[in-house]
Amino acid sequence: MQQNERQRVLSWLALVCISWLACAASAAESVGVAIISDGPQYQLQDVEDIFVEELIALTDNVFDIAFKQVPADWSLASVDAAMRKAYADPDIDMVLVLGFAANQLVVSRSEFPKPTFLPLVFNADLLDAPTSRIGSGRRNLNYLADRVPFREDLRTFQRVSRFQNAALITDSVILEAIPQGPDIVREQGQGVRFTFIGHDGSNHDLVTAIPDDIDAVLLGGLPRMPPALFDQLLTDLAKRRLPTFSLVSESEVQRGALAADIVQTDYRRTARRNALSMQAVLLGERTEDQPIGYDGKRRLTINMTTARMIGISPTFDVLSEADLIDAQSVTSGPTLTLENVAAMAVASNLDLATSRFDVSIGEQDVLEARSNLLPQVNLGASYVIRRDEALARTPGFAERTSSGVATLTQPLFVEGARSGFRQQELLQVGREAALEVVRLDSIFNATTAYLQALRAQNQLTIQQQNLALTKSNLELAQDRVRAGSASNADIYRWQASLATARSPVLSALAAQQQAYDELSRQLNRKLGTVPSLEMPASDAPFITSAKEFDGLINNPRRFDWFADFVVEQGLGNSPELAQLQAQIDATARDVLARKRAFWAPDVSLQAQYTDSLDASGLGSGTAVDQINDWSVSLNASWPLFDSGNRRSQLSRSRLLQRQLSTSRDAVAQRIEQNIRAGLLAAQASYANIAYSEQSAEASRRNLDLVSDAYRQGTVSIIDLLDAQNQSLQADLSANNAIHDFLLNIMSLQRAANSFDFLLSPEAKASRAAALLDYITQKEAQRQAAGALP
């Protein structure tokens, strides 16, 4: 019974509400609103709908708004005629002017017979618009205009690029509407000489009208210019290397203008503000008492592509403050990935190229040592003049003789030469291992520089986002002060925070270029260039899938087996150990040679042929002069006593062999330690990725909540500053976490002497299978030993 009673009450309340709404709708007062437009235009085409929607939404069920279009035709006369027509129409109660040019033309009228609303006034100062303490002060007039004076825009533009002679290009109807405008512009121009160029809607070639001495162009609104021709105008101005500043919005900077200091007008917000004023008048308030001013959203925006095209380089102070479009310089070369960075380092790194010369030089050392075991052939010639006449008369001794000698020497058993050749062969193996060390180091250094450059890019982006957020919060504080819900202390605090936030941006800019230069050096590219970088996936460096890696890194028992496998692989692949082993083997061969030196002679075969080529003078002509001689000898020699030199050399070689063996053990121990340390670092940083991302997400949500609460006035500025700083630190930590993990993986793979991401698909699959088999065998051994599963 109670349930039925409750349903009857609810039904009765619903019927009452429906009846009330029906009565209210039937009682809505009819109001006629004339909409004055400029005529056909390319800009603001959808703005009219926004203003109509906001007015209907605000006055629905109270006033029945009937709209009537009264278009003009892009002239002062046609706008004046449209206004007179609207004022004379008995069905029109209010006039809403939505033409951009018409707003400027109408605001300076002396009389407004009916409530008139001008929500798109460009600049009240330039138009000499009427004003009182709050409203316009002129009967039946309300307008909305940005309170920022023209001189402030000009001062901002001068910070981007200094200029003395400027051209102000705008629609000719606007110039016609403000005959006093040029004088006001010059008054606020701070010494800048202005030339005014009007656009009549038909002649779009405005560049030819710009004098040669102009060094900057200000765009004051060109609503009749087709978008394609407007873009061409910006391109032509850039070709003339003229800095172009928009007085309208940053959307023109997006299209190619150099800079603007005002964001795109929020027409929805402006339309709502205008609807509130119209509603107040409909409810009995005076039109001239409605607010007329608002502070436009100021934000310096610079198109860096245009800046580079025209050769302008804004200061770091300006860059840290502005929103930058295409902030990165033009990238050079292909997009860099983890794989091609490694390949480019192997192909181009200068340190690696230098080490290749060591190997080539070593090859010549091997050939030189080998030559001591091969036959040696020498040719000699002699020419003799004898001054002893008595000897010259002796048969066989001519006064002048010449002869040639050919000698062949073949070592048969020369232990020193054999040992030297073998040692050079082993040392060459060590040089090739040393080259592999440099190759691995080059890959590690290049990939590390690549990841550091990515980190620096993201750090800069985060700091720039924080700077932009600080600017937005400053604007929010200014809105709250104007609404009376906060004091100027909030503005001062945010201004201080804004100044503080610029410093990290400058530091991040410098760090980014330093990281780019380090990467360029590792790849032997021109320093100062900007590479295009592609962020690798977090599992890109592995031979296993992300799920398999997660199972290895997060399970303590499997992690230990994984470490054992990597250590075993790393020791087996170590070029450092291979280099030391080659030196140990070379030293062992030297020890053998030192031992043999005590008893093994050096044996060589020598053959010599002598040919008497010529004889002349006294004593010549005998048979002895024509004798050719040859000989063959087998030589053997060994030292009997060297004062202990051989024994000292043998002891030295043995000590060197022991030293190298000890060094090899130390290096193997250090390699194992580095691998295990790298695995532990990777394990920690891998887990930190998820934690830092969760922290960043929670901090962003908290910042959103606190921002909304600050906007509503329920929390203090201290709470918002704290939330913003917490979110910034969390974002920086999240960025560091992923890069720290990838950097740890690079360190681990360098310690293990194998970069898995460079393996072929077949090699990756083979190594992954070997790893999983190793883990499976360990698990089987453990269970066979009776351990709990």
Image (cartoon, rainbow, N blue to C red):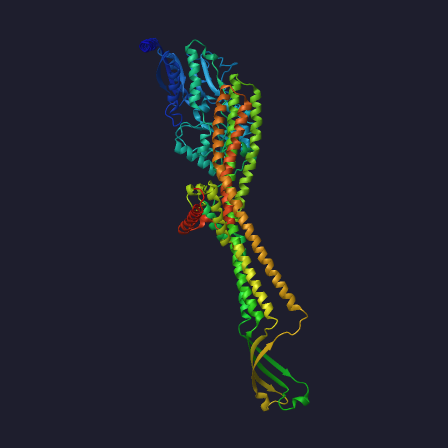
Query: Residue 632's quadrant in the figure?
Result: bottom right
Task: Give 158 or 604, whichever is nearer the viewer.
Answer: 604
User: Horizontal placement of 202 versus 306: left or right?
Assistant: left
- Which residue appears at 56% of the width and 39% of the height? 510
Residue 708 position, x and y percent, is 48, 22
Residue 774 position, x and y percent, is 44, 49
Task: Give 525 or 292, whichever is nearer the viewer.
Answer: 525
Q: Is residue 241 visible?
A: no
Q: Eyeballing the image, is 627 above or below 195?
A: below
Number of numbered discs present?
Answer: 0
Q: Eyeballing the image, is 679 above or below 216?
A: below
Q: Quadrant of the N terminus?
A: top left
Task: Give 530 or 193, whichever is nearer the viewer.
Answer: 530
Residue 160 position, x and y percent, is 54, 33
Q: Eyeballing the image, is 443 above or below 656?
A: above
Q: Is residue 95 visible?
A: yes
Q: Quadrant of the C terminus?
A: top left
Residue 686 position, x and y percent, is 48, 39
